[in-house]
Amino acid sequence: MDKQRFELGLNQRKATLGADYVENNLKAADDFNRPFQEAMTEWCWGFGWGDAAIDAKTRSLMNLTMIAALGKMHEWELHLNGAITNGCSVEEIRAAIHAIAIYCGVPQGVECFRIARKVLTEHNLL
């Protein structure tokens, strides 16, 4: 493991998803899934999110569309919270969901709007 990349990833992951969420995931890790948590933190968050070529807000919007395309809606909700943290506006989130509905299908767009309404309401943005 590249310790420096892991630390960069850990900081980036906490900045987007929240320190409590990340720390709880790492504390809950055991011998079975700890290697995955560490690798994901280093690779996804350190290598991927640590590249400054794409700002966090744009990266969040990209993630929302890709995760929706995969139909991983628990992760989509988590990353929607992260997108809000990274400065995505309601209008940008709406536009991303429109693209999701066009390219992934209307039912997926409906599901994203359902989850987005819940999350945006929790953030007092609707």
Image (cartoon, rainbow, N blue to C red):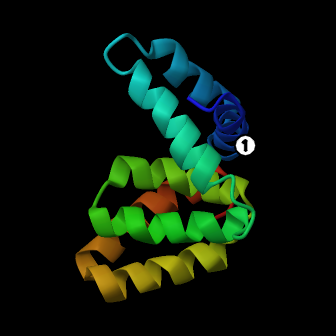
The one nearer the camera, 96 or 117, is: 96
Q: Quadrant of residue 113?
A: bottom left
Q: From the viewer's perspective, tell me whether residue 62 is left or right of residue 126.
A: left
Closer to the camera in the image, 15 or 4: 4
Instruction: Kindly identify the residue that appears in the image at 44 percent across and 71 percent down.
Output: 65
Q: Which residue is mark 1?
A: 15
Q: Given the image, on which type of amino acid does mark 1 rest?
A: Ala
Q: On the rendered image, what quadrant is the N terminus found in? A: top right
The answer to whether residue 20 is left or right of residue 41 is right
- Residue 46: give x, y in percent of width and height: 63, 45
21 over 89 or under it: above or below = above
List x then y, in percent, for residue 69. 32, 70
Residue 58 place in picture, x, y as percent? 65, 71
The quadrant in which residue 94 appears is bottom right
Asked whether 10 or 74 is in front, the reply is 10
- Residue at 35% x, 82% y is 101
Percent across and percent down for residue 122 are 60, 48
- From this viewpoint, which residue is outermost toward the bottom? 102
Residue sitting at 51 percent across and 28 percent down? 38
Tell me, yes or no, if residue 88 can be seen here: no
Question: Does 100 appear above or below 117?
Answer: below
Taking depth in this image into account, of 85 and 45 the one nearest to the observer is 45
Asked if residue 94 is positioned above or below residue 117 in the image, the reply reads below
